[in-house]
Image (cartoon, helix red, strand yellow):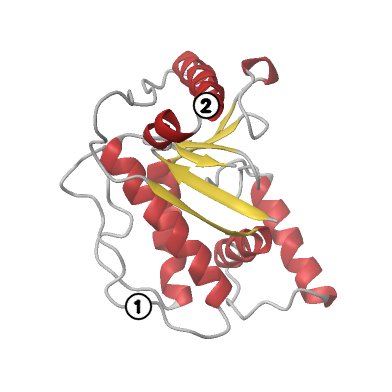
Amino acid sequence: MGLSISVGMLHDQARNDPEGLEYHLRAFERLGTAVREEGIDWQEPPFDGPPRTPAFSGGFPYRYLTRLRRVLALLRSGEPVVPAEEDGARWERDCGLIQDEASMFSSHLICHADNAGYYVPVDFADPLFLPSEAGVAGAGMVGSVQGLLRELAFVAPALGITGTGLGTASAPGAASNPAPPERPLPEGPFEPERFAWQQLHAACLAALAGGHAIVFH
């Protein structure tokens, strides 16, 4: 089992999955209504006509996401980023750091459900925690694509990832959309973290280019 990530899924579903299309249309309508009630002007772009920008589909094992969140938690705690060993006292302690960061309600990478929910391409400081009656997947936790991108840029050096403009994009379709890493990601002890980083970064670029939400499912 693992996390699937999609951006701009409606065009494909309109052709190949009518039931899935109806489900996600209703889900996007609930999401759009809920975030507008929080003062955020966004809705999933229409899917009639040819796609304006390429869609994105990817994913990775859930534990990769935990490992990437661990890197952010270590950095924010001022601790060195060392390779993860997913057993023993050190792993349990580091998972506690992730929970400590979650309790601050400020991280778009950490304050999000593992297996469901959304990031929308609007820049806001802290993740949204929507009421349960809004019916938004992922326990109502909604992140900002731009906020996620800034956090990915923050952890990139610790993972050996370099590039220009990794966290600077501000608007859908903007010419300032950040570039991919300058060279292929190196292999090594942080390979799971780098793979999760690369997938999330690509999803952010696709979301910003087309104005679509990133969907965890």
Q: Residue at x 65, y 56 (%)?
A: 2
In depth, the one of 117 and 69 nearer the eye is 117
Instruction: Say which quarter of the image contains residue 71.
Output: bottom right
User: Looking at the picture, does residue 3 appear above or below residue 8?
Assistant: below
Name the secondary structure under disc 1: loop
Residue type at mark 2 is His
Locate the N terminus by quadrant: bottom right
How much space separates mark 1 and mark 2, taking CA atoms? 34 Å
Please provide percent x and percent y for residue 43.
Answer: 39, 22
Which of marks 2 and 1 precedes in the sequence?
2
Please provide percent x and percent y for residue 62.
Answer: 66, 58
Query: What number of labels is visible?
Result: 2
In depth, the one of 121 and 18 nearer the eye is 18
Residue 184 numbered tag: 1
Q: Residue at x 33, y 73 (%)?
A: 162
Please provide percent x and percent y for residue 191.
Answer: 54, 77
Q: Residue furthest right?
A: 88
Residue 24 numbered tag: 2
Residue type at mark 1 is Pro
Instruction: Say which quarter of the image contains residue 63.
Output: bottom right
Name the secondary structure under disc 2: helix
Q: Residues within 10 Å of mark 1 (few under 14, many from 20)?
A: few
Q: Going by the image, does 94 lie left or right of 211? A: right
Q: Nearer the viewer, mark 1 or mark 2?
A: 2
Q: Going by the image, does 169 lie left or right of 67? A: left
User: Looking at the picture, does residue 63 appear above or below residue 171?
Assistant: below
In depth, the one of 142 and 136 nearer the eye is 136
Q: Going by the image, does 34 lie left or right of 112? A: left
Q: Residue at x 61, y 80 (%)?
A: 82
Please provide percent x and percent y for residue 119.
Answer: 48, 38
In depth, the one of 165 and 184 nearer the eye is 184
User: Looking at the picture, does residue 37 appear above or below residue 166?
Assistant: above
